[in-house]
Amino acid sequence: MSHTPVDPFAATSSPRRMPLSYPGVWPEFSSVISQSRLWQIRDRHGDELSWERTSPCRLGECRVQLDEQLALSPGSAPELATVLEAAGAVSLDDRVPVLAIGSNAAPAQLRHKFEDRDTPLLIPSVRARVDGVQLGFTAFLAPSGYVPATIYPEAGNTVELAVQWLDVAQLREIDATELPYYRRVWLDDSQGVRVLLETGEVLPGVHAYVAEGGMLGRDGVPWVLGAGLNQRPTSMDPARWFADQEAVIAALQASTTIAAELGTTAAQFIEARHSGGDRAELLIEAGFVIADNRFGTLAPQTAG
């Protein structure tokens, strides 16, 4: 079972189609994601964004490096607000910021979710450093067979994720792919969360999808998904850190309870999920579930 995408951003490379590739390939730059293009977001002067060098600027004033597809000057770098207007898309003011914690940060997964939908895919996706949050694994398996991502509070930790600006129709589409296994909540300073964009802006808060039922871990210590550009801190126990699906699946299959039901190889694990439900009770029985996730107790948000 190959999990090395030929084109990592194509819908055919989505984790829904290639489960062992989860969470998919995340762009190494802030971008505008469409069904067929990935346009880089730059600073107000048209230079590449940099955590160290970029002076804070409003997202709408940031430049977008275009190609020939949009009806503006090929190779130009207009402001993001202008790009959205020229594309007939909803303005930034009428969008909400949503933290992309797993495969939603991968253009391939978004393209798969939005293909054959009436809702157009045109989403600004901006790299962000998020304080007070850790990236982990859900206490259930996805229909495609992989172990999805969730977030949980971890004071003093910073994780690099993406914040995506969704309009109401896009938000409803994403809600439909996440519920009821996740709830969408609002995170801000009151939960100890701070979101710094690559543009230099600090957001007052952000929507985020948090898994129902807790997260995976062992002996009360939650596991960590090492996705994107995130690296394991030297102070972190290596036993907490899982860089890919094969690693976390192997850790689960080390349990005889899991292996008896889901096999001893990654391929068997994926196939068993296809025919056997989300396996939440099995994960609890095997002692891998930490039910207490404070983010999971926050009030669910609804699309307007």
Image (cartoon, helix red, strand yellow):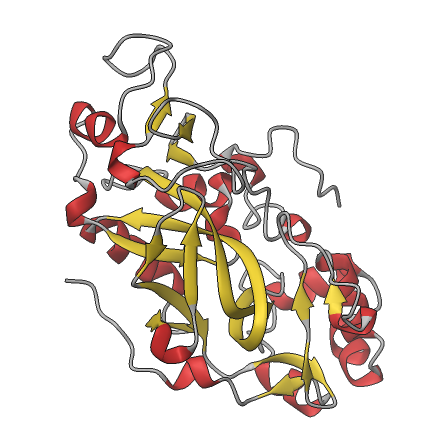
Going by the image, does 255 lie left or right of 65? right
Q: Is residue 64 above or below residue 107?
A: above
Of 159 and 302, the residue lying toward us: 159
Percent across and percent down for residue 48 are 48, 27
- Identified at 64% across, 47% down, the residue is 229
Percent across and percent down for residue 232 are 74, 60
Asked whether the viewer can see residue 140, the reply is no
Q: Is residue 34 above or below residue 74?
A: below
Going by the image, does 74 lie left or right of 48? left
Q: Is residue 167 above or below residue 138?
A: above
Q: Is residue 220 above or below residue 46?
A: below
- Identified at 59% across, 52% down, the residue is 23
- Identified at 62% across, 61% down, the residue is 145
Quadrant housing residue 4: top right
Going by the image, does 186 lie left or right of 20? left
The image quadrant where one finds the C terminus is bottom left
